[in-house]
Amino acid sequence: MKKIVYILIMTLLVGIIPGYAQDKPKKSRAEMHKEMVEFKTKYIAQEMELNDEQKEKFTPLYEQMDRERWQVFRETRALEKKLKNDRTATDADYESVVKALNQAKEKGAEIEKNYNEKFGKFLTAKQLYKMKEAEDAFNQRMMKMRMERKQKMQTKQKAAKQRIN
């Protein structure tokens, strides 16, 4: 199972990363996000062991849910960035961002609950559980890969600085 996850993720990265090294026009964040969502949806559907009929119903519904959750995340992330870069932020500013973050978590949970009801019409409880497991595994793997890429970039930057000195 872990091999399949690893192979799928590596396949995705092999398709995306070489694009950065070539002279092709770079994809927009929106295009990259769309590809990632499609890949994630296929991966999750595979882990859930859906039949063709279930996949047909699951894919558009899951992608719609993911878009809604992504929008909530983007809005709160923008607030966090703004606050982080504001050296004159007051306690009231921090309080309003904390409230917004809590509201976003509630909204995310509400979105998930609503979609779980929709998914429950054609998925088993076991498949719903596997969906959560697969989402968590996918997100953990993506985070690990981001951290590895960040560390690799930092190592390259340090090496470049040492060559200059």
Image (spheres, rainbow, N blue to C red):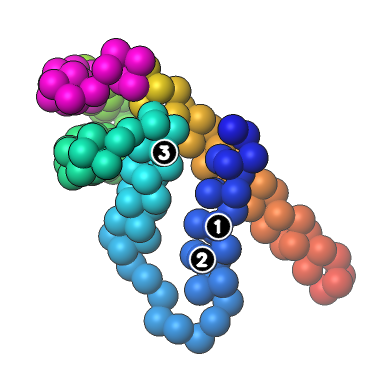
Q: Provide residue 109's location: percent of width, then percent of height.
A: 23, 19
Front residue of this view, candidates 66 and 54: 54
Q: In the figure, residue 153 lies in which quadrant? A: bottom right
Please name whichever residue, 4 or 38, is drawn nearer the observer in this view of the structure: 4
Whether 108 is drawn above or below 12: the answer is: above
C-alpha gap between disc 1 and disc 2: 6 Å
Which quadrant of the structure image shows residue 25? Answer: bottom left
Circle 3 — which element? helix
Residue 3 percent across, percent down from the top left: 64, 40
Residue 71 on the magenta span: no
- Position of the C terminus, as image quadrant, is bottom right
Find the residue positioned furthest to the top: 125
Amino acid found under the numbered disc labelled 3: Gln
Label 3 environment density (alpha carbons within 10 Å; few <14, some 14–19, many ≥20): some
Nearer the observer: mark 3 or 1; the answer is: 3
Give the class, few, some or many, for how many residues have Cα within 10 Å of label 2's Cα (few <14, many ≥20).
Answer: few
The residue tagged 2 is 15
Image: magenta residue range = 107-128
The disc placed on residue 11 is: 1
